[in-house]
Image (spheres, helix red, strand yellow):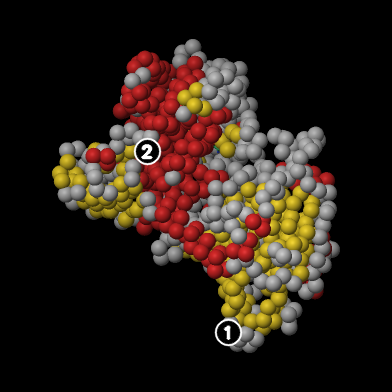
Amino acid sequence: MNDLSAPSAAPTTAPAATPPGPAYGHFSADSREYIITDPRTPRPWFNYMWNEQYAGLISHTGGGFSFLESPRDNRLTRMRYNCLPWDRPGRYIMVKDAETGQYWSLSWAPTIELKYDRYECRHGQGYTTIVTEINGVRGELTYFVPTDVNAEVWRVKLTDLSGRARQLEVYAFTELMMGNALNDIINQPNDKHFTDIHFQEDLQALECTRRYWVLNKKVSVAQPNIGWDYHLYFTLSLPVTGFDGSLDKFIGRWRSEANPECVETGRMHNTEITAGDPVAALQSKLTLQAGESVDFAAVMAVVKKDEDVRQHAAFRWEELRDTAVLDKKLAAVRAYWDDYLGHIRAQTPDAALNTMLNVWNPYQAAVTFDMARNSGYYHGGLLFGNGIRDQFQDILGMVITHPERVRARLLNALRFQLQDGSTLHNFFKFTNNGEKTNHSDTPLWLSFGVVEYLNETADYSLLDELVPFYDGGEPATVYDHIVRSLDFCLSATTERGLPKMMNGDWNDTLDQIGPLGKGETVWGAFFLAYGLRKCFPLLEKRGDTATRQRWQTAYDKLGEVTNSVAWDGEWYIRAFKDNGDPVGSNAHKEGKIFINSQTWSVISGLAPEERGNSALNSTYELMGRPNGIQICWPSFTEVDETMGLISRCVPGKKENGAIFNHASSWFVLASLLNGDVERGVEVYRRMLPPNSSARIDRYEVEPYVFAEYVTSPDHETEGQASHSWLTGTAVWMLRIGLDYILGFRTSLEGISIDPHIPAAWPSFTAERVFRGKRLKLTVHNPHGRNQGVREMRVNGQLVAGNFIDPASYAAAELVIEVTL
Ligand code: IFM
């Protein structure tokens, strides 16, 4: 490390192309669905179905798991970790032809060895439909979670395609977990002494529960003495002809879910269990006349033990077995997403951008809002809980549509702040605890989220809400909480005024820079300055002149110190180690340049113009790749004990030099703020999943949502993506697209219209709901410009400048005409 030998050559920065390549699927004409036509995708491609409490991941083969509120503490169904094939088990409906004995799954898996005549999976918002045709039967299976019941529905339509009457058997089954998912992995032989499954004739349902619950904040040998608080019911809307609660009995010896003995023999054991591995398996039999269709559903519902499922406040049991009612519930799911997506509209010359901004990007933002970095195929749902820094970013999408949910979320998350202004790093529902990891950036995200909420809503009442501290003391107002958080970060600085790195900053893997408490984060300095500046309008509004002045002084001082000690000649240093050595300098052989200190030097407003230009140019030239911008370069090839996990990770992946999309999105933002519009939009477009996944067999993960990272050329798997769905990239790409490219810039006072578009766009239209008004924007670009509003009319009236206070208009719709 740190020698002065020549750097490796910078790899090519060729812009992204979109060659056809092998296709496993495509977007529907209206972009609302991603349609997978070949199930042998390079990885399982997932979707989510959920309401505020009940949630499930669903892959394109029916794989995935379900949970109520907490994927660690309250898992309902199993997912086998490190499983091959990948996404087992799942929620399966098998159909058997009683005459031929042939049986198959309606979701392809687990009977993947069979030859299907047709397979199609449509992932939509909150539902997934899988259509298969095999053995002269079409199956249409739609999975969804109703908006108003803690249940999941597997809605089925079977149609005879053979032209003859069919005697069919139907088997619906899923492996149950019921309780602590981590404990299920490490102590399943013990866990299975507590299961309890019985068939309730009047409900035509299996009633399932577990008689203990590991809910003692951590999994340990000290067993808690409490029961799992729920009953899980599994029913079929058809008359049930057999059931099984025992996985062993249903599957049979030395078999798998691909060939359950009960399905093969047609004989269910009708096992009720008081111990053993649990399955919810139901059988029914039906006759299908030639060409006829039959509709039915399997439903899994969860209620508290002290609630009576037969007289429940949220539903009538019969309704859950009535396909007409269930279809209305599916319609309600669709209506929810129509409304959610209806808050934003983009009609630009760029089809991929439209697809993402209109549908998949806001949808992914909603997923991150509710799943954090926790409940995903790549995140597993066992470890992370809700990250504080993630929580306060993940509100950026939902705040547009459901500010009341964001308000509650902010108030909840602020409970995990300590009286000194520092915060836990994460927290878990149910157990209401988390870890204090001392990442230096975490407290700074609190004010970020609160200000964004206020920019959207102008709901200043939030600031006066009282919220307790995690370590006790007197509850304080939200305003006090956020002042404390920034003051804590100002206090956690070194003598010369740079923030201490502590155990890492946004980059979790820079964890050995400052173990002695002297290491400094330069990115942290820019981010702290940004955080201070972002609060200035709020402090002024609040009349808090003392804090305003104090923070201005601090902001200026951060500008002085970063520019006096952290400028490396062509870019900014990333950090300083405990011994004062710089991290991210041209003098190094590896890790010469890091993206965050360049981008945030501009975003914070602290980089003088020439330095900002140079920092961004260097970033683009040295780290620009077809999928976006690398996080650092060159990647570390040797373990450096004074850096941290970053250098232990293989070169080119994750924080060690991947195209880390979250950080790459900040390059787009910095470029747009810096006036480098063509370059900013160009990188934005490279990163859009439909573009960045052009080489799909290499890219591997879902081409309809952002992944956390794409492997850079520093690794042989260059172009491979991972950790799709749960990434801060989602909200940042959404808001950079909406706020900075389309140009809807919110502030405490109102909204400014300030598009940054490629000069080649002759015009575009866009819509956004803001403070109860629908803003309908048309931007004309007759002179091929890329920024700068020259004229703006609102509802036909010419206005000065580009600012709108929606409260000053009575109309519900504002028609905005802008000329660049
Ligand atoms: O900042 C983190 C994020 O909170 C979780 N994923 C990795 C990022 C970078 O280290």
Q: Is residue 479 visible?
A: yes
Label 2 secondary element:
helix
Mark 2 is on which residue type?
Answer: Thr
Which residue is drawn at the image coordinates 82% and 57% (left, top)? 273
> Which of the two residues, 626 or 428, is positioned nearer the viewer here?
428
Which residue is drawn at the image coordinates 32% and 56% (left, top)? 347
In this picture, residue 796 sits left or right of residue 423: left
In this picture, residue 520 sits left or right of residue 757: right
Mark 1 is on which residue type?
Answer: Gly
Query: Where does the image place residue 22, in percent across and percent down from the top left?
Result: 51, 64
In this picture, residue 108 sits left or right of residue 397: right
> Which of the two residues, 398 or 575, is positioned nearer the viewer here?
398
Task: Residue 457: give its label.
Answer: 2
**Quadrant in which residue 204 is drawn:** bottom right
According to the picture, the residue beneath numbered tag 1 turns out to be 291
> Furthest residue to the left?
798
Disc with the residue nearer the chain's start (2 vs 1): 1
